[in-house]
Image (cartoon, rainbow, N blue to C red):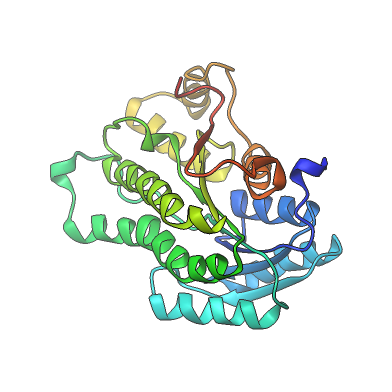
Amino acid sequence: MSDSFRIDGMAVFVTGPAKGMGRAITLALAEAGADLVLAARDTNAAEAVAEEVRALGRGALVVACDVTDEASVIAAVEASVAGFEPREWGLVNVAGGTGPSGKMLWEHEVAEVREIFDLNLMGSFLTIKHWLPRMMAMGAGSVVNIGGTFGFKGVRKAWAYGATKWALRGLTKSSALEAGGTGVRVNMVNPGGVDGPRLMRQLGEAAARDGITAEEAYGAFAATTALGRMSTDRDVALAVTYLMGPGARNMTGQDLLVDGGTVV
Protein backbone atom coordinates (compact mmCIF):
# COMPACT_ATOMS: atom_id res chain seq x y z
CA MET A 1 0.00 0.00 0.00
CA SER A 2 1.11 3.60 -0.59
CA ASP A 3 2.33 5.76 2.28
CA SER A 4 -1.07 7.51 2.39
CA PHE A 5 -2.55 4.22 3.60
CA ARG A 6 0.24 3.15 5.98
CA ILE A 7 -0.67 3.04 9.67
CA ASP A 8 2.40 1.26 11.01
CA GLY A 9 2.44 1.05 14.80
CA MET A 10 -1.25 1.88 15.28
CA ALA A 11 -3.54 -0.53 17.09
CA VAL A 12 -7.15 -0.65 15.90
CA PHE A 13 -10.18 -1.92 17.81
CA VAL A 14 -12.68 -3.41 15.34
CA THR A 15 -16.20 -4.47 16.28
CA GLY A 16 -17.94 -7.10 14.16
CA PRO A 17 -14.63 -8.39 12.71
CA ALA A 18 -15.45 -12.03 12.08
CA LYS A 19 -17.04 -12.12 8.63
CA GLY A 20 -17.88 -10.20 5.48
CA MET A 21 -17.11 -6.52 5.62
CA GLY A 22 -15.68 -6.72 9.13
CA ARG A 23 -13.18 -9.41 8.16
CA ALA A 24 -12.16 -7.48 5.02
CA ILE A 25 -11.62 -4.29 7.04
CA THR A 26 -9.60 -6.13 9.68
CA LEU A 27 -7.29 -7.70 7.11
CA ALA A 28 -6.85 -4.46 5.13
CA LEU A 29 -5.82 -2.64 8.32
CA ALA A 30 -3.30 -5.38 9.06
CA GLU A 31 -1.91 -5.10 5.51
CA ALA A 32 -1.47 -1.37 6.17
CA GLY A 33 0.66 -2.07 9.24
CA ALA A 34 -1.78 -1.99 12.16
CA ASP A 35 -2.11 -4.43 15.01
CA LEU A 36 -5.70 -5.45 15.66
CA VAL A 37 -8.11 -6.00 18.51
CA LEU A 38 -11.01 -8.12 17.29
CA ALA A 39 -14.00 -7.35 19.51
CA ALA A 40 -16.79 -9.87 19.03
CA ARG A 41 -19.53 -11.84 20.70
CA ASP A 42 -18.45 -14.94 18.77
CA THR A 43 -14.81 -15.14 19.82
CA ASN A 44 -14.22 -18.46 18.06
CA ALA A 45 -15.09 -16.93 14.69
CA ALA A 46 -12.98 -13.87 15.50
CA GLU A 47 -10.02 -16.06 16.42
CA ALA A 48 -9.99 -17.53 12.91
CA VAL A 49 -9.61 -14.00 11.47
CA ALA A 50 -6.99 -13.19 14.12
CA GLU A 51 -4.90 -16.07 12.77
CA GLU A 52 -5.09 -14.48 9.32
CA VAL A 53 -3.88 -11.19 10.82
CA ARG A 54 -0.93 -12.95 12.52
CA ALA A 55 -0.06 -14.62 9.22
CA LEU A 56 0.39 -11.10 7.82
CA GLY A 57 2.96 -10.44 10.54
CA ARG A 58 0.75 -8.23 12.73
CA GLY A 59 -0.38 -8.62 16.32
CA ALA A 60 -3.94 -9.71 17.00
CA LEU A 61 -5.94 -9.87 20.22
CA VAL A 62 -9.46 -11.29 20.46
CA VAL A 63 -11.71 -9.84 23.17
CA ALA A 64 -15.29 -10.75 24.04
CA CYS A 65 -17.55 -7.75 23.51
CA ASP A 66 -21.27 -7.14 23.29
CA VAL A 67 -21.48 -3.57 22.02
CA THR A 68 -25.00 -3.15 23.43
CA ASP A 69 -23.72 -3.76 26.99
CA GLU A 70 -21.68 -0.95 28.52
CA ALA A 71 -19.92 -3.16 31.07
CA SER A 72 -18.85 -5.49 28.26
CA VAL A 73 -17.50 -2.56 26.22
CA ILE A 74 -15.56 -1.19 29.20
CA ALA A 75 -14.00 -4.60 29.87
CA ALA A 76 -13.06 -4.99 26.20
CA VAL A 77 -11.40 -1.56 26.07
CA GLU A 78 -9.43 -2.25 29.23
CA ALA A 79 -8.30 -5.64 27.94
CA SER A 80 -7.19 -4.01 24.69
CA VAL A 81 -5.09 -1.37 26.42
CA ALA A 82 -3.54 -4.03 28.64
CA GLY A 83 -2.79 -6.20 25.62
CA PHE A 84 -0.73 -3.64 23.67
CA GLU A 85 1.90 -1.16 24.82
CA PRO A 86 0.89 2.53 24.76
CA ARG A 87 0.42 3.75 21.20
CA GLU A 88 -1.98 5.55 18.87
CA TRP A 89 -5.36 3.84 18.70
CA GLY A 90 -8.01 3.53 16.06
CA LEU A 91 -11.62 2.39 16.34
CA VAL A 92 -13.80 0.94 13.59
CA ASN A 93 -17.46 0.32 14.37
CA VAL A 94 -18.66 -2.40 12.00
CA ALA A 95 -21.02 -4.35 14.27
CA GLY A 96 -24.64 -3.83 13.28
CA GLY A 97 -27.76 -5.39 11.86
CA THR A 98 -30.59 -4.74 9.43
CA GLY A 99 -33.46 -4.91 11.91
CA PRO A 100 -37.12 -5.41 10.98
CA SER A 101 -38.03 -4.99 7.33
CA GLY A 102 -40.78 -5.75 4.86
CA LYS A 103 -43.47 -3.88 6.75
CA MET A 104 -44.69 -0.35 7.24
CA LEU A 105 -43.75 1.88 10.17
CA TRP A 106 -47.07 1.44 11.97
CA GLU A 107 -46.72 -2.34 11.84
CA HIS A 108 -43.55 -2.43 13.95
CA GLU A 109 -43.33 -3.50 17.57
CA VAL A 110 -41.57 -1.09 19.91
CA ALA A 111 -39.22 -3.84 21.15
CA GLU A 112 -37.85 -4.66 17.69
CA VAL A 113 -37.20 -1.01 16.93
CA ARG A 114 -35.38 -0.53 20.23
CA GLU A 115 -33.29 -3.63 19.52
CA ILE A 116 -31.91 -2.33 16.23
CA PHE A 117 -31.27 1.14 17.70
CA ASP A 118 -29.37 -0.51 20.56
CA LEU A 119 -27.16 -2.40 18.12
CA ASN A 120 -26.63 0.12 15.31
CA LEU A 121 -26.55 3.37 17.28
CA MET A 122 -25.98 2.71 20.97
CA GLY A 123 -23.29 0.15 20.15
CA SER A 124 -21.24 2.77 18.32
CA PHE A 125 -21.99 5.37 21.01
CA LEU A 126 -20.66 3.08 23.74
CA THR A 127 -17.40 2.24 22.00
CA ILE A 128 -16.82 5.89 21.09
CA LYS A 129 -17.67 6.96 24.64
CA HIS A 130 -15.01 4.71 26.12
CA TRP A 131 -12.30 5.14 23.45
CA LEU A 132 -12.41 8.88 22.77
CA PRO A 133 -11.09 10.01 26.18
CA ARG A 134 -8.06 7.73 25.79
CA MET A 135 -7.37 8.99 22.27
CA MET A 136 -7.87 12.61 23.30
CA ALA A 137 -5.45 12.21 26.21
CA MET A 138 -2.81 11.01 23.73
CA GLY A 139 -3.63 13.77 21.23
CA ALA A 140 -4.08 11.30 18.39
CA GLY A 141 -6.48 8.68 17.12
CA SER A 142 -9.06 7.95 14.47
CA VAL A 143 -12.61 6.59 14.55
CA VAL A 144 -14.47 5.25 11.53
CA ASN A 145 -18.14 4.33 11.79
CA ILE A 146 -19.82 2.15 9.18
CA GLY A 147 -23.09 3.66 8.01
CA GLY A 148 -25.05 3.11 4.83
CA THR A 149 -26.84 4.82 1.96
CA PHE A 150 -30.16 4.49 3.82
CA GLY A 151 -28.77 7.25 6.04
CA PHE A 152 -29.01 9.64 3.10
CA LYS A 153 -32.58 9.04 1.93
CA GLY A 154 -35.97 7.85 3.02
CA VAL A 155 -36.79 4.19 2.55
CA ARG A 156 -39.99 2.22 2.60
CA LYS A 157 -40.31 -0.92 4.70
CA ALA A 158 -36.90 -0.63 6.35
CA TRP A 159 -37.34 2.69 8.13
CA ALA A 160 -35.88 1.58 11.46
CA TYR A 161 -32.58 0.57 9.88
CA GLY A 162 -32.48 3.80 7.88
CA ALA A 163 -33.20 5.89 10.96
CA THR A 164 -30.25 4.33 12.82
CA LYS A 165 -27.93 5.29 9.96
CA TRP A 166 -29.23 8.88 9.89
CA ALA A 167 -28.60 9.04 13.64
CA LEU A 168 -25.11 7.57 13.25
CA ARG A 169 -24.24 10.42 10.89
CA GLY A 170 -25.19 12.86 13.63
CA LEU A 171 -23.12 10.97 16.19
CA THR A 172 -20.14 11.02 13.83
CA LYS A 173 -20.29 14.75 13.12
CA SER A 174 -20.93 15.82 16.71
CA SER A 175 -18.16 13.63 18.15
CA ALA A 176 -15.79 14.93 15.46
CA LEU A 177 -16.46 18.47 16.68
CA GLU A 178 -16.01 17.53 20.33
CA ALA A 179 -12.75 15.59 19.82
CA GLY A 180 -11.20 17.63 17.03
CA GLY A 181 -9.38 20.10 19.23
CA THR A 182 -7.12 17.29 20.46
CA GLY A 183 -6.25 16.00 17.00
CA VAL A 184 -8.61 13.01 17.09
CA ARG A 185 -10.62 12.44 13.91
CA VAL A 186 -14.06 10.83 13.54
CA ASN A 187 -15.41 9.86 10.12
CA MET A 188 -17.93 7.54 8.53
CA VAL A 189 -17.92 5.18 5.54
CA ASN A 190 -21.29 4.53 3.94
CA PRO A 191 -21.50 1.45 1.71
CA GLY A 192 -24.27 0.90 -0.78
CA GLY A 193 -25.27 -2.64 -1.67
CA VAL A 194 -22.24 -4.79 -0.80
CA ASP A 195 -22.00 -8.01 -2.76
CA GLY A 196 -22.19 -10.98 -0.42
CA PRO A 197 -24.46 -13.44 1.40
CA ARG A 198 -26.43 -10.86 3.37
CA LEU A 199 -27.29 -8.79 0.29
CA MET A 200 -28.25 -11.90 -1.65
CA ARG A 201 -30.54 -13.00 1.19
CA GLN A 202 -32.20 -9.58 1.27
CA LEU A 203 -32.60 -9.51 -2.52
CA GLY A 204 -33.99 -13.04 -2.44
CA GLU A 205 -36.61 -11.99 0.09
CA ALA A 206 -37.51 -8.94 -1.99
CA ALA A 207 -37.69 -11.04 -5.15
CA ALA A 208 -40.08 -13.46 -3.49
CA ARG A 209 -42.34 -10.59 -2.43
CA ASP A 210 -42.24 -9.04 -5.91
CA GLY A 211 -42.64 -12.27 -7.87
CA ILE A 212 -39.30 -12.06 -9.71
CA THR A 213 -36.08 -14.07 -9.60
CA ALA A 214 -33.17 -13.24 -7.32
CA GLU A 215 -31.03 -12.60 -10.43
CA GLU A 216 -33.56 -10.07 -11.70
CA ALA A 217 -33.61 -8.36 -8.30
CA TYR A 218 -29.81 -8.23 -8.29
CA GLY A 219 -29.71 -6.71 -11.77
CA ALA A 220 -32.34 -4.13 -10.91
CA PHE A 221 -30.45 -3.13 -7.77
CA ALA A 222 -27.12 -2.80 -9.60
CA ALA A 223 -28.82 -0.67 -12.25
CA THR A 224 -29.64 1.96 -9.62
CA THR A 225 -25.92 2.83 -9.34
CA ALA A 226 -24.11 5.25 -11.63
CA LEU A 227 -21.37 2.67 -12.25
CA GLY A 228 -23.81 -0.18 -12.75
CA ARG A 229 -22.18 -2.45 -10.20
CA MET A 230 -22.26 -3.38 -6.53
CA SER A 231 -19.55 -2.49 -4.04
CA THR A 232 -17.36 -5.21 -2.57
CA ASP A 233 -16.10 -5.76 0.96
CA ARG A 234 -12.65 -4.76 -0.30
CA ASP A 235 -13.93 -1.43 -1.64
CA VAL A 236 -15.25 -0.58 1.82
CA ALA A 237 -12.12 -1.86 3.58
CA LEU A 238 -9.81 0.34 1.51
CA ALA A 239 -11.94 3.42 2.23
CA VAL A 240 -11.75 2.70 5.96
CA THR A 241 -8.00 2.16 5.77
CA TYR A 242 -7.53 5.45 3.94
CA LEU A 243 -9.49 7.37 6.58
CA MET A 244 -7.33 5.77 9.28
CA GLY A 245 -4.11 6.82 7.62
CA PRO A 246 -2.03 9.98 7.12
CA GLY A 247 -3.57 10.71 3.73
CA ALA A 248 -6.75 11.70 5.58
CA ARG A 249 -5.03 13.74 8.30
CA ASN A 250 -7.22 16.79 7.64
CA MET A 251 -10.51 14.93 7.21
CA THR A 252 -12.95 14.69 10.09
CA GLY A 253 -16.73 14.67 10.44
CA GLN A 254 -17.01 13.33 6.89
CA ASP A 255 -19.48 10.71 5.65
CA LEU A 256 -17.80 9.05 2.69
CA LEU A 257 -20.07 7.17 0.29
CA VAL A 258 -18.75 3.93 -1.22
CA ASP A 259 -21.80 3.00 -3.26
CA GLY A 260 -20.97 3.04 -6.96
CA GLY A 261 -22.97 6.24 -7.29
CA THR A 262 -26.27 5.22 -5.73
CA VAL A 263 -26.61 8.54 -3.90
CA VAL A 264 -25.54 11.26 -6.32
Q: Nearer the viewer, residue 207 or 67?
A: 67
Q: Locate residue 8, reporting x and y percent.
A: 79, 58
Q: Is residue 205 left or right of residue 64?
A: left
Residue at 57% across / 41% down in the picture?
251
Q: Is residue 101 above or below residue 226?
A: below
What residue sits 17% from the left and 57% below the top? Answer: 110
Residue found farthest to the left: 106
Of residue 37 and residue 48, the one placed in the foreground of this image is: 37
Is 17 placed left or right of 59 in the picture? left
Marks counted in the figure total 0
Q: Is residue 137 above or below residue 149?
A: below
Task: Give the image location of residue 261, x and y in percent.
Answer: 52, 22
Residue drawn where x is 18% and y is 42% of the image:
105
Q: Is residue 148 left or right of residue 142?
A: left
x, y percent for residue 91 = 57, 60
Image height check: is 160 above or below 60? above
Please name the residue shown 54% across and 71% down the image: 134
**Where residue 22 sits: x, y (%)?**
60, 54
Quadrant in which the N terminus is drawn:
top right
Q: Residue furthest front?
A: 181
Q: Quadrant of residue 116?
A: bottom left
